[in-house]
Image: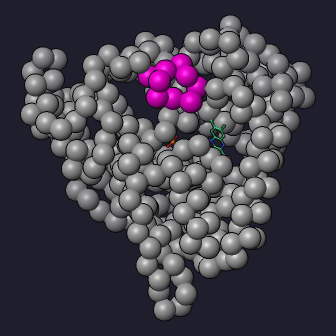
Amino acid sequence: MKDFAAALLKRLPQADIRQSEDMKKHTTFRVGGAADYYINVHSTEDLKEGIACCRQYQMPVYVLGNGSNVLVSDEGLRGVVFQLDHDFSEVDLKQEKDGTIYVTAQAGALLSKLGNLMLEKELTGFEWAAGIPGTIGGAVYMNAGAYGGEMKDIVRSVTVLTKDLEIETRELSQLFLGYRHSALMDEDAYILSVTFAMQRGGREVIAAKMEELANRRKEKQPLEYPSAGSTFKRPEGYFAGKLIEDAGLRGYRVGGAQVSEKHCGFVINRDNATAQDIYQLTEDVKRIIKEKFGVDMEREVALLGKF
Ligand SMILES: Cc1cc2nc3c(=O)[nH]c(=O)nc-3n(C[C@H](O)[C@H](O)[C@H](O)COP(=O)(O)OP(=O)(O)OC[C@H]3O[C@@H](n4cnc5c(N)ncnc54)[C@H](O)[C@@H]3O)c2cc1C
């Protein structure tokens, strides 16, 4: 460990490398134990150097965006967490002859930031995404979607750092974006930037749509509590929240974790929950739904560490 720490520092002399960093501070569930090492990444070079060092010392690697779709174990994470900083977020715009505007954003850009930029530049197609509290990298990795839109509709290509630490560009057809899934989930590739194809729209129409969707979120979702959004994927032919409600699980609690009373599809950290409380609650929900309705529920939230 000592050798590794020294090697990491040598490769990343400018980086703020933290040891035993509490992951509660870096995830929207506000739970999780300490990561052995935690680095806020500001550039492609730092990510590449850092991962190369981990490979050399056989240290596990975790790459996070905004931590809004993960549940980190109370035992923490052995290895290194690289969290893409929100300043890893340069954006570049190019207009093609056919009128399409190609917007390339670095992976650490928050969807809210890109949403505001799209509004400012009067580009339509991103309105549904602006209220999701994640980064571009996290959103494309799992093909985030909301209100009838999904990343698949607007992504054109993605630049990744491959498991061999090469920088490659993948076209949309190579990403196999499906319901909360991408081909990148099946390999150790990290998203560095994403290019979106956008169209011109009217500023007022875009602003009105964004406001309407933000109001719908406030009205329907328990935004006043820590969570990771919808905890389960939509089982084919059903709605997760409706199944949970019909099973009588509205408000169901395990320790400090609770099925939201406002939106049954959300598990919330109601009162100092542990990651184990949240995990156990999701296991209970899966078992009860299977017993009552014969439906298999799958977590949408990624589990990191030991459960
Ligand atoms: C209140 C609330 C509302 C939400 N609403 C929605 C919604 O409407 N629709 C929706 O789809 N989701 C929603 N979510 C879930 C979450 O915000 C999205 O899944 C988001 O896209 C996750 O992005 P992130 O940057 O936080 O990813 P993280 O949580 O940091 O990471 C999620 C996964 O992606 C991987 N990952 C992250 N960045 C990269 C990268 N650069 N390269 C490779 N892998 C990476 C991580 O390793 C991890 O496995 C909501 C969450 C909350 C808390």
Q: Residue at the location (62% across, 47% down)?
A: 132
Residue 24 forms part of the magenta stretch: yes
Q: Quadrant of residue 77?
A: top left
Q: Is residue 280 above or below residue 12?
A: above
Q: Position of residue 46 (x, y in %)?
A: 22, 44
What residue appears at the point 71 percent right and 67 percent down from the top-left corner?
206
* Position of residue 103 in the picture relative to residue 54 (left or right): right
Residue displayed at 33% across by 36% down: 40
Ligand 1 shows up in the quarter that is top right
Coloration of the structure image: one colour
Please indicate, yes or no, whether residue 60 appears anywhere in the rendered image: no
Q: Residue lying farthest top?
A: 255
* Residue 13 showing in the rendered view: yes
Q: Quadrant of residue 286?
A: top right
> For the point 45% across and 41% down, which residue is it?
65
Q: x and y percent of residue 263 in the render? A: 81, 32
The N terminus sits in image quarter: top left
- The picture places residue 2, in percent across and down from the top left corner, at 12, 17
213 with respect to 52 (left or right): right
- Of residues 288 and 62, which is closer to you in this image? 62
Q: Is residue 229 above or below residue 257?
A: below
Give how far across and how far down residue 187 sits, in percent. Answer: 38, 47
On whether residue 49 falls in the magenta region, the answer is no
Q: Which residues are magenta?
A: 23-31
Residue 234 sits above or below residue 18 on the image:
below
